[in-house]
Amino acid sequence: MLPLADIRVIAFEQFGAGPWGTLQLADLGAEVIKIEDPVSRGDVGRYVPPFAEGEDSLFFETFNRNKKSISLDLRRDGARGVLEDLVRRSDVVYSNLRGDQPARLGLTYERLEHVNPRIVCCSLSGFGMTGPRAAEGGYDYMMQGLAGWMSLTGDPDGPPTKSGLSLVDLSGGYVSAIAVLAGVWRARRDGVGCDCDVSLFETALHELCYVGTWAASRGYVPPRRPSSAHPSIVPFQNFATADGWLVIACPKQKFWEALCGALGRPELAADERFVDFAARDRNREELLAILDAALAERTSAEWLEVLAKAGVPSAPVNDVAAALEDPQTQARGAVLELDHPALGNVREVASPLRLGDEPPVARAPFRGEHTASVLSEVCGYSLERIDELAASGVFGA
């Protein structure tokens, strides 16, 4: 029995952030039923290039494995009844729409509690369900700019720079999954559901973390550092070697002392300019000039062997292909493989959530693939009832 096998989620979701949130639940065994709008041809993620075939893409596969899909056009008479029958037998209604849309579409606790008093209604939107920007769309790149992330990223003389990945979307998905689990736990304990109002903007603000605390409390203006350096801990950054780049991290005094030994420069550890965190930060440029010169003398592989023996935290700066073939990746089975009827062989990064036995993995669903089976098994609809609804256009053309 997978940890979340007794949770059913009805999901109005598309693209990245929302599907990423429910993916975490699906990978842990929750039954996630995607409601796809037949008029708009379902989740837009189905059509994201490259590697798209018809209504399937590797992008969509990444975010939607282990889920089910039904087609439902909420504009049609009778569709609301179908939705409420699903809600009656579910734990969660999840959406990632604009903040004003859950209320308009009747996906809030206020509109659904009469159907199921324990239902948890989670909205993941750009800006939340209230405030002056509630009706605006919001995307990851926007949030990285708006929340100050881009001002922190990149070289000092370069332009503001986004992260190489859509980290606000991914983080928002994780936060929404935590909110869902907390809401379901309380609903089962107290018998009462709730609304969960999660926004990408506030997620990005929250992840300013200690930099946000420094700025809010002391007016701190975070500098951008060369070589992706930590704002205050030295050395804690990328370094060029004779043939590439590596990362060295010395967030503890013992690591700094071990690095000095590994470099064959033990005297640096006792040098007053570099004796502790504060001194190394004050004399950052002098110290980095020494380290840059030393590390450029040997290859990354040579240095990584030396640093590992000395106990200094370090790693190569891999490209994506190398990361997926790393020995640790292989040893942990972190890349899974499946066959897809449209896409052929698909290799995906497995969930990092490891709770007991490895869960089975199913491909992402075709659009509307489970309409009949879900309505029959979950709602108890007869084949005749399903045919009537289909004829009325509730499931699309």
Image: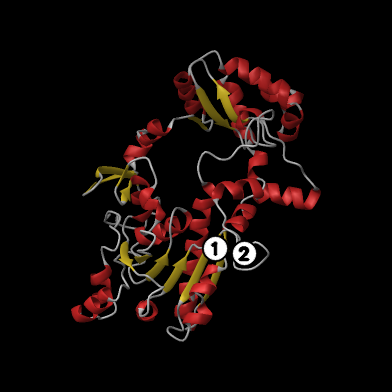
Q: Say which of 270 and 172 sits in front.
A: 172
Q: Is residue 102 visible?
A: yes
Query: Please, which residue is most extreme toward the right here?
Result: 218
Q: Say which of 236 and 64 sits in front.
A: 64
Q: Is residue 265 visible?
A: no
Q: Tag 2: residue type?
A: Ala
Q: To which residue does mark 2 refer?
A: 134
Q: Residue at x 27, y 72 (%)?
A: 374
Q: Tag 1: residue type?
A: Arg
Disc 2 from disc 1: Cα separation = 7 Å
Query: Please, which residue is most extreme toward the bottom here?
Result: 114
Label 2 environment density (alpha carbons within 10 Å; few <14, some 14–19, many ≥20):
some
Q: To which residue does mark 1 refer?
A: 98
Residue 367: x, y in percent? Answer: 30, 59
Residue 275: x, y in percent? Answer: 72, 28
Helix, strand or loop at mark 1: loop
Residue 1: x, y in percent? Answer: 29, 66
Instruction: Say which mark, if any, is on residue 189.
Output: none
For this view, does 202 lie left or right of residue 81? right
Residue 2: x, y in percent? Answer: 32, 64
The mark that comes first in sequence, 2 or 1, is: 1
